Image (tube, rainbow, N blue to C red):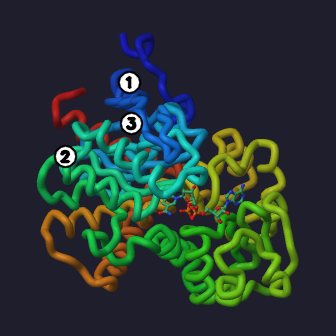
Amino acid sequence: MFGKDELNMCQKCNLWLEKVKQLKSLSSKDLFILKNPRRVTAVNYPVRMDNGSIRLVSAFRVQYNDAIGPTKGGIRMHESVDQEEVSELAFLMSLKTALMGLPYGGAKGGIKIDPTNLSEGELERVSRGYVKEMRNIFGPEKDIPAPDVNTDARVMAWMLDEYEQIVGHSAPGMITGKPIILGGSLGRDTSTARGAFFIINEMFGDIKGATVAIQGFGNAGGNLAKFLHQAGFRVVAVSDASGGIYNEKGLNIEAIVANKGTKSGFEKVVSEGSMITNEELLALDVDLLVPAALGGVITKENAGRVKAKKILEVANAPVMSDAEEILDKKGIEIIPDILANAGGVIVSYFEWAQNMQNFYWTEQEVDDRLREKMVSVYTAIKKVQQEEKISVRSASYVLAIARILQAEKLRGRL
Ligand code: NAD
């Protein structure tokens, strides 16, 4: 019965699951649970525009797996959002929370709109409208959203306010990534980069001076470049959507941040190195390549040109499944997204825990706990990888899936 009836909502999730199936025996019921989201909510809601017209906005929330606890995952706003993409990201969130040992399941939300074309008032109405639509499925002990692509602390504040108006009481644990004054956590801003930095320290030990190229100079990539530079790594290239800058001796990241401003492009700091394209950055001969911008940037077409010794996936799903086979053959180690960028959801968990206790931590406490979590999970995964002689991604998937299935079985659902 299972298999034939599969909804098959997420083709990319299935590709990764097929790989795990070759390593661990999974029953058809196990696969059904893992291949299909538990609940998908799709809505079309009206938003009043500034000129008085009404725009219908399509939006989704996929609560992929809730066996371990309330579901957790960001909300992105982008014109390309669709149910398939949100499902894949919700699947990855389920694996990520399970792998990191957080008391959560996984979810993701998407609003199909380009927010850069909206006024502040329109953006607020889009954000509040989404929460109105999802009011029955959100809640501190049901499903806890957070920021993702094109959403930020300001959007979280509107969403929290809308929710609290509906339920009629304070409920800061309903959403994370909030402004500090509304119950946000210290250290949340830099948490993804910080988490990635702790893993890189473990990977390279005392080999400071290791060379690193980073694609993406935003919240994750930009902060990571800063932490690595301060710690003595040689960040030889960084880029954004408009292209990148390269200096084989290492870039002065502080000078770049100070002189570049918030604008896209590195023209103002060209004296720090020479300009390169994003494709050239991906092919640099470095100790570590960090894709920290978009998904799907390393493909079977360009994987053959990658010369980095290791790759750390700070972006979600930057390495395509068929590209991974080429990189594996070249002996390039890949630290997967569900481990590499988990710092964000870990500090989101810390934020939620602080909200639930109404007791707040110092930035140092947040940083110490984040380091402890990242290092202990990385060490456990490396142990499985070495014992079973499998890739770091496979070891991460095997661990996460085992936990999800154990929770499903203990609940009597399998
Ligand atoms: P951001 O918007 O702050 O920065 C994105 C950066 O990528 C910018 O520098 C942008 O110019 C660059 N970029 C965009 N298109 C590009 C292209 N075609 N080529 C090269 N660079 C391009 O975003 P962020 O928060 O830093 O997130 C980056 C990635 O990390 C995303 O994939 C996101 O899903 C993932 N991630 C972020 C967090 C987080 O907490 N920030 C957590 C988990 C995963």
> At x 36% / y 73%, what residue is drawn?
370
Residue 22 in picture, x, y percent from top left: 52, 33
- Amino acid type at circle 2 is Ile
Label 1: how many Cα within 10 Å (few below 14, some 14–19, many 20+): some
Give the number of the mark in front: 3 or 1: 3
Quadrant in which the N terminus appears: top left
Label 2: how many Cα within 10 Å (few below 14, some 14–19, many 20+): few
Q: Which quadrant of the view contains residue 216? A: bottom right
Q: Which corner quadrant of the figure contains ligand 1?
A: bottom right
Along the line of sight, the residue nearer the viewer: 355 or 291: 355
Along the line of sight, the residue nearer the viewer: 231 or 165: 165
How far apart, in angstroms, are the residues tagged by discs 2 and 1?
36 Å
> At x 18% / y 57%, what residue is drawn?
171
Name the residue carrying label 3.
62
How far apart, in angstroms, are the residues tagged by discs 3 and 2?
22 Å
Q: Which quadrant of the view contains residue 310? A: bottom right
> Where 243 sits versus 406, above or below?
below
N-terminal-most mark, 2 or 1: 1
Disc on res. 166: 2
Give the number of the mark in front: 2 or 1: 2
The total of numbered circles placed on residues is 3
Proximity of marks 3 and 1: CB atoms separated by less than 8 Å: no
Q: Secondary structure at mark 3?
A: strand
Name the residue carrying label 1.
32
Asked if residue 145 can be seen in this view, the reply is: yes
